[in-house]
Amino acid sequence: MISQGLVKLILSWIEEDAPLGDVTTEALIDKGVAVKAVVLAKDYGYACCLADFAEALNTLGLRARALKADGEPFHRGEVLMEITGDARVVLVLERSLLNALSYLMGVVRETRRVVELVRSVNPRVRVAATRKTIPGLRMLVKKAVSVGGADTHRLSLSDAILIKDNHLAIIGDVEAAVRRAKAKSTFMHKVEVEVSNADDAVKAVKAGADAVLVDNAAPQQLREVIERLKAEGLRDRVIVEASGGVKPENIALYAEAGPDVISTSHITMRASPVDISLEVIEVIKNQETPSDGT
């Protein structure tokens, strides 16, 4: 479960952000102070991972409750999460929690925008993420992509065989690479190969590739690859993925060319964070720690 890994992740964030403690909070806030705080939206967006973070925070000794489900829209001024517990813990977590949530919800919002652009042109085409994600946040980012309506693609290098340009530079031949991969893979693993032209796409499919990745090609080049596969009677035997240089400004042109999938790192690496804040709304108790000797 995501929340289990989140506990370790949050603890690592605290170690990074407060390696020797939070000197400001420790100087100002006595032990024994508990607060109620809320995560407040300062922008519009769509919720993501709030319940996962709430569960992790509960494991860490706070009482947290998500007020929006994954994918649920929200507007400026709405409360997204309630957190109650030790004031020192809440404050030391504040920035890391907000950084992660604002980024993830930004991914959801941008993914939805890109998916809608593609669907308006060709509803059959799926938008997918890539493995270009911030290290350590992979599972969370992939969930955000899914909440936004796109395909997660590979979660890791263990999920499928994707023969890229550097593999081909070493093997030297598309057909040989596909045949070797098919011979050594299990029935559970699909084999996809990167191609740069129609000839290599045809060779890859004839060698048994389940998918071809047309990488860094202009929309017209992508269209030519697809038309060639149709002419060879191979189009229905393979998934055609387009990737490389795909942005919101040109994604409609790629969708018009008729691939099955368009993958783009834009949705994970260029999404604008959603503006949110954490506000303390109530001091529940304030018991000063007795001085030594009393």
Image (cartoon, rainbow, N blue to C red):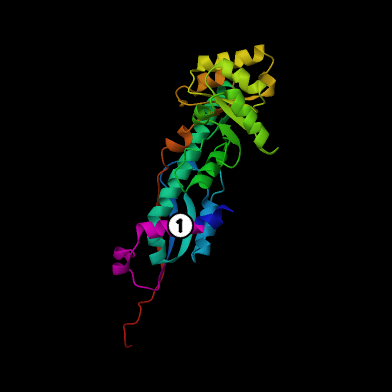
Which of the pair 294/5 is nearer the observer? Answer: 5
Q: Is residue 33 magenta?
A: yes
Query: In terms of secondary structure, what is the magenta stretch mainly?
Result: helix
Decide if residue 125 is in sight here: no
Q: Secondary structure at mark 1?
A: helix
- The percent position of residue 42, horizontal first and vertical second, equals 40, 45
Q: What quarter of the picture does the C terminus occupy?
A: bottom left
Specify the farthest residue to the top.
231
* Residue 13 figure quarter: bottom left
Q: Which residue is under mark 1?
A: 10
Region in magenta: 7-34
* Residue 278 figure quarter: bottom left
The residue shown at (61%, 26%) is 176
Q: Is residue 99 magenta?
A: no
Which of the pair 139/56 is nearer the observer? Answer: 139
The residue shown at (45%, 57%) is 10
The residue shown at (58%, 28%) is 193
